[in-house]
Amino acid sequence: MTAYDLSTLIGRAERVLAQLEAWLPPAPPEIDWTAHAFRWRKRGARGWLDAVRNVSTIHQEDLQHIERQKAIIDRNTRHFLDKKPANNVLMTGARGTGKSSLVKAMLASYADQGLRLIEVDKSDMADLGDIVELVSTRPERFIIFCDDLSFEEGEAGYKMLKSVLDGSVSASGDNVLIYATSNRRHLMPEYMSENLSAKHQSDGEIHPGETVEEKISLSERFGLWLSFYPFKQDDYLDIVYYWLAEHGCSPEDIEASRTEALQWALERGSRSGRVARQFARDWAARHV
């Protein structure tokens, strides 16, 4: 082969490689371990931890009328940071009552002590094993957070979550916990037909069907279950008044907001903390 033929062959190979590079996804960026919060991102089959630059900040004192839930989560998180036994947490209940905000409040309280947050979309739960392995050698303590977690029949992430909850995440000395919120206590849809599979013994004992057992088995892998309930009217107004004060409203303006705050909640069909904060933003913008 002449030098000309070799040069031509190399040129063609370089053009082919350039075309392949145009089709291939770029390599994931380096992980910025100085960040306090991350999102799990996917590009094709590749996943990586993407640092969150502007973390949504909320403090524990901002969360009103969930004192019991707040105390339990705070205690569990402190145990986790102290490398004591700690539990994975499932939070269920009414929307807008502070479930996801409570997780963010833990980060605000303990980021300076090494706590880190990794937000994972429920569609990426099948990657949990990869995430756990990725952070396994890090000195920080990681909470993997999945908001509004639920599964339909046959989803891939279901078995991976069961495996991680019962396996390496809960083992002593590991640096990962899972905090999840859901509107479904058992994380999966429940059907009337499943009740028909229950077995009634002659002594009156009832055995649930296998489908029901399978669904319950996932939620039972969370060591802590916390329920959140709709707020009473007075509780809702307390939250409204708290946020109005935070926005700089005068006591007179806060007192005058009562009727409109109740109408706001009535129009939205909810007396939640989220609705209260949304009203406070609107009222403060018009009166401060």
Image (cartoon, rainbow, N blue to C red):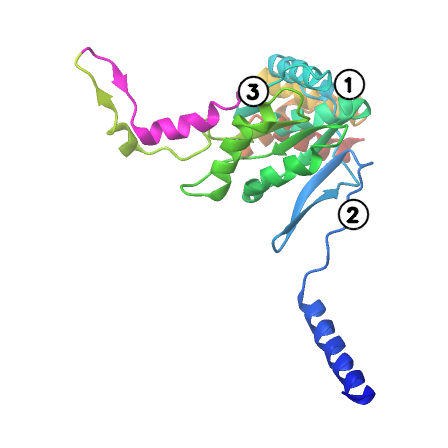
Q: Give whichever of discs 2 and 1 has the lower sequence position.
A: 2
Kindly tell me whether residue 242 is visible in this rendering: yes
Quarter-of-image position of residue 170: top right
Q: Secondary structure at mark 3?
A: loop
Residue topped by disc 3 = 231
Q: Amino acid at mark 1?
A: Pro
> Going from the N terminus, do you reach mark 2 or mark 3 first?
2
* Front position in the image: 248 or 36: 36
Residue 251's disc is 1
* Element class at badge 1: helix
Magenta residues? 203-230
Q: In the rendering, at what x and y percent does residue 161 appear?
A: 52, 34
Is disc 1 in contact with disc 3, using a CB cutoff of under 8 Å? no
Apparent side of residue 248 relative to residue 160 in the rendered image (left or right): right
Residue at horizontal 51%, vertical 32%? 163
| Residue receiving disc 2 | 30
Query: The disc labelled 3 sits on which kind of residue?
Result: Phe
- Magenta span has 228? yes
The residue positioned farthest toward the left in the image shown: 202
Q: Residues within 10 Å of mark 2 (few under 14, many from 20)?
A: few
Give the x, y percent position of residue 225. Answer: 52, 19
Gap between marks 2 and 1 measured at Cα: 50 Å
Q: Nearer the viewer, mark 2 or mark 1?
A: 2
In the depicted structure, whether residue 77 falls above or below residue 268: above
Q: Amino acid at mark 2?
A: Glu
Q: In the rendered view, does 162 fall on the left or right side of 260? A: left
- What's the CA distance linking mark 1 and mark 3? 23 Å
Q: Residues within 10 Å of mark 3 (few under 14, many from 20)?
A: many
